[in-house]
Image (cartoon, rainbow, N blue to C red):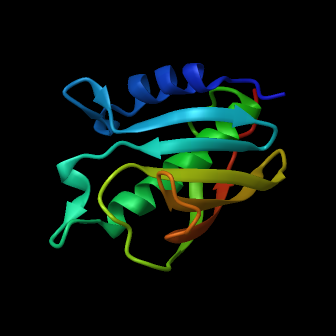
Amino acid sequence: MPMLSAAELNVFLDRHFPQLLDEGQPLIVVESTGEMEAVLRLVEHDRHLRPGGTISGPAMFTLADVGLYATILAQIGPVGHAVTTSMSMNFMRKPPSGHLIARCKLFKLGTRLAVGEACLYPEGSDEMVAHATGTYSIPPRR
């Protein structure tokens, strides 16, 4: 079972990453956590759009990175100094404006490294718009 619930992760992210808030409202929300997985939502906001009404690449990359980070913290607890060491993303199709969902899954969770993927979908669709893989460094526990 995860150490942190979705609600606990949302409080942690709001407190430690104020750049993910807009006038006090979260732009990324943890919807659920499970064994080695989590689901997050990128809340629709004008700042995420590029010309033509599609969600920008940087917004999708942020969702994937925060998603994997939150998935790791759900498993190990609030270890704020876990950091991204590498990330790769494939953009597969243009997403429409609206909420974007990240389904995140860890493949490996060791004492020093975690490896996982984030699959991004427009809300209500099963057509993946982007796929990311990432590796994160976990600091030693003291």
Tell me residue 91's x, y (percent). Answer: 47, 77
Say above or below: 74 vs 90. above
Q: Left of 57 or right of it: where is 11?
A: right
Say above or below: 93 vs 108. below
Q: Quadrant of residue 69?
A: top right
The residue positioned farthest toward the front in the image shown: 124
Tell me residue 107's x, y (percent). Answer: 81, 58
Q: Is residue 83 visible?
A: no
Numbered label tally: 0
Q: Nearer the viewer, residue 34 or 15?
A: 34
Say above or below: 88 vs 66. below
Q: Quadrant of residue 14?
A: top left
Residue at 53% of width from left, 42% of height from top?
40
The N terminus lies in quadrant: top right
The C terminus lies in quadrant: top right
Q: Left of 27 or right of it: where is 62?
A: right
Tell me residue 86's x, y (percent). Answer: 59, 67
Say above or below: 39 vs 26. below
Q: Nearer the viewer, residue 71 or 39?
A: 39
Residue at 38% of width from left, 34% of height from top?
17
The residue positioned farthest toward the left in the image shown: 51
Q: Is residue 126 visible?
A: yes
Q: Left of 135 or right of it: where is 66?
A: left
Residue at 18% of width from left, 51% of height from top?
46
Q: Nearer the viewer, residue 101 or 85?
A: 101
Tell me residue 52's x, y (percent). Answer: 17, 73
